Image: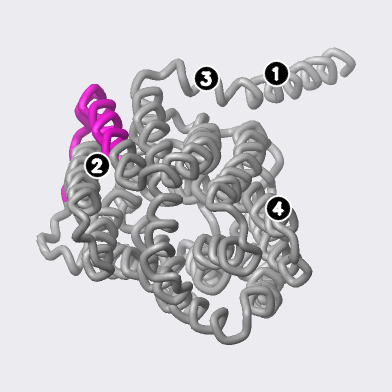
Amino acid sequence: MYVALLLNRRTVRFDSVKKRRALLEIFRHREPRLLITGQTVSGFGDGIANVALTLLVLDTTHSVSRLAVFAAARMVPTVAFLLIGGAIVDRFSRRLLLLLSDLSRALLTAALVAFIVSGTLQFWELLVFAVLFGTFDAVFMPAISALTPEIVPEDLLNAMNAVRPLSSSFVGNMLGPAVGGLLAAWSTSFALSVDCATFFVSAGALILMHATPKPPSSDEANMFHEIRVGLRYVRKNAWIWTTLVGVSLPNAILFVPTSVLLPFYLVHDLHSHKFVVGLLFAAFGLAGTFGALYAGSMKTPRHRIRVMWSVWTFGAASALTMGFATHTWEVFIMPIVSAPTMYIGNVIWESMIQSEVPRELLGRVASVDWFVSLGISPIGLVLAGALSSRFGVQRYFVVAGLICLIPGILILISRKVNAIDAHREPSELTQTSEPGSVLSTPLEGPPPD
């Protein structure tokens, strides 16, 4: 018996070491290494562009509502075409679709730079750019989610789903915005040119990857029928659709508008320097980096839904700190608190989706994920801009923060939503299922609703 206990302790220690090394283990595999490298460089450009475009619109319009409309213009086509994008992702090579998306967005950014340099750029042209950019996002987002389990071993999914946000957080949300604030203060066109170049680097990394096969073909030629199949799968699994509906409200009225309201509050209410806007995005990235680091090495929780929603709800509560934010450093509290909670919850969620959903449905389920969770965000952006203009940014954040606590509390106490974790045994947490398999749960029968 002593020997058995000793072996058990050694196994626990080995599993712990393996978890800590999982982040490094990812880079021993060629395909994930290329994907991460390309996306990291592209994320750096995105961080620069986010600051540059925000300041460009503010300098052009001096209006928080116009800035909200610009952000919504990018999200509307993304949401509108996500379901079609997901069906496309389940029909064609995910790698080729990512390559097409990167090249198309590089050309769009180059065209925007040309308009800026010519001195003829108008607000409506910025809106056209946002709409076209968002259209290609509708393919990119489900494609990268569906490609991940094709190139990553099952036991490294958690690590991969942490490395991706880790690289995007550290480089794209921290270094990129910090550099973007400096470059945009000097030249917006140059800042966006750097972003354009990073898309080509990402495309090069995708070209170097081995070709990936098309997903298993469906007997049904009608794409809209395939979309309905994805919707039915989501609907019959309560843990999926309730989470998607639950996050749609915080995304719409709190987290998505943050990228608009906080920069406006800093520049126009606190009269902070433009560079501080870059630092704000960078602070979010730095905090998110720590969250992603922890998420990549943490043990899969037994009660995944409850842990995920606990950290998300805590992140939403951080919006209440804006009620007393009258100095620049106080504005930084919300992104520093919400970023790590967002990343930790997202890693649990992505790994759960990729482990539980059949491989041939991943693209469509991922597109439904994005479609529902971001579906009302364009409306939320416009509404947030209008309400903040009338009642003030601080009051808006306090009310929105209180409202966003409701979905988390309801899901945390719901037995039906948490039923998928009810029969998980501790031994399951270190075991892996077959790639693309669906674990047996009581929710896989006919739709309960």
From the image, tell me which residue sits under label 4.
337
In the rendered image, the vertical position of residue 121 relative to residue 449, given as above or below: above
From the image, tell me which residue sits under label 3.
25
Q: Quadrant of the N terminus?
A: top right
Point out the frontmost of discs 4 and 3.
Answer: 4
Residue 380: horizontal and vertical position, in percent? 47, 76
* For the residues bearing labels 1 and 2, Cβ distance under 8 angstroms: no
Q: CA distance from mark 1 to mark 2?
A: 40 Å
Point out the frontmost of discs 3 and 2.
Answer: 2
Residue 14: assigned label: 1
Name the side, left or right, on which 120 lies relative to 347: left
Residue found 29% across the figure and 59% down from its top: 134
Q: Secondary structure at mark 4?
A: helix
Residue in front for this viewpoint, 376 or 310: 376
Mark 4, residues whose alpha carbon is within 10 Å: few (<14), some, or many (≥20)?
many
Quadrant in the picture for residue 221: bottom left
Residue found 27% across the figure and 34% down from its top: 197
Q: Point out the tag, 3 or 1, that comes first from the N-terminus.
A: 1
